[in-house]
Amino acid sequence: MAKMTERMIELFKKVPNAILATSTVDGTPNAVPVGAKKIIDSETILISDQFFKKTLANLKVNPKMAITFWEGREGYQLKGSVVIETTGQRYEDTAKWIEELGNKAGFPLKSKGAVILKIEEIYSVAPGPGAGKKLA
């Protein structure tokens, strides 16, 4: 497993949205913006599923994903394996969090599941000679 640095964690928390990428078994890509994201620990990310269709279908047959986030000239891509939780305490906590977010926004939201990413690789997406460099 790869671990995010404190700076990576700080930036992930700061940026409002990230791009989540999945693919079908045959390699057809899918990328979507996500905002309902949390850090569980330096090796684990949680994404709440409110609207996933292709993304969810892809994860069920190919449980791998990448999530990319950046600000200015600093950015990172996290890659790894995924499990989807639709029951249990973590899912219940996620559902409550998403409902509260929706209430604050004046828009009803309901979580269909907690997508848990175990980070296996971390890459730089910053422009320049280090772009694409594996960091962990």
Image: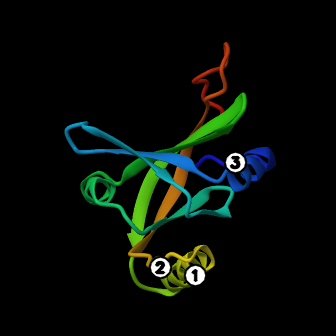
- Give the distance between the C-alpha atoms of the residues marked 1 and 3, in whole angstroms: 31 Å
- Is 43 in front, or is 30? 30
Mark 1, secondary structure of its residue: helix
Q: For marks 2 and 1, give the CA distance.
A: 6 Å
The CA span between labels 3 and 2 is 32 Å
The three-letter amino acid code for the residue at tag 3 is: Met
What mark, if any, has residue 4 been given in the picture? 3
Callout 2: few (<14), some (14-19), or many (20+) C-alpha neighbours within 10 Å? few
In the rendered image, the residue lying farthest to the left is 26
Residue at image location 46% in from the left, 86% down from the top: 88
Task: Quickly name the residue at label 2.
Answer: 108
For the residue labelled by badge 2, is the local secondary structure a helix, a strand or a loop?
loop
- Extreme top residue here? 129
Q: Are marks 2 and 1 in contact (CB under 8 Å)?
A: yes
Q: Position of residue 21 (x, y in %)?
A: 41, 44
Please name the residue that numbered disc 1 is placed on: 103
Q: Nearer the viewer, mark 3 or mark 2?
A: 2
Residue contact between numbered discs 3 and 2, judged by CB atoms under 8 Å: no
Residue 18's label in the rendered image is none
Q: Circle 3 sits in a helix, a strand or a loop, which is it?
A: loop
Residue 136, visible in the rendered structure: no
The residue under the point 69% across, 48% down is 4
Quadrant in which residue 28 is drawn: top left
| Residue 117 visible somewhere in the drawing | yes
Residue 50, position as x, y percentages in the image: 41, 69
* Residue type, numbered disc 2: Pro
Residue 36 vertical placement versus 72 (above, below) = below
Q: Earlier in the sequence, mark 1 or mark 3?
A: 3
User: The disc labelled 1 sits on which kind of residue?
Assistant: Asn
Image spot of residue 114 (x, y percent): 46, 71
Q: Is residue 51 left or right of residue 108?
A: left
Task: Work out which quarter of the rendered image holds the C terminus and state it.
Answer: top right
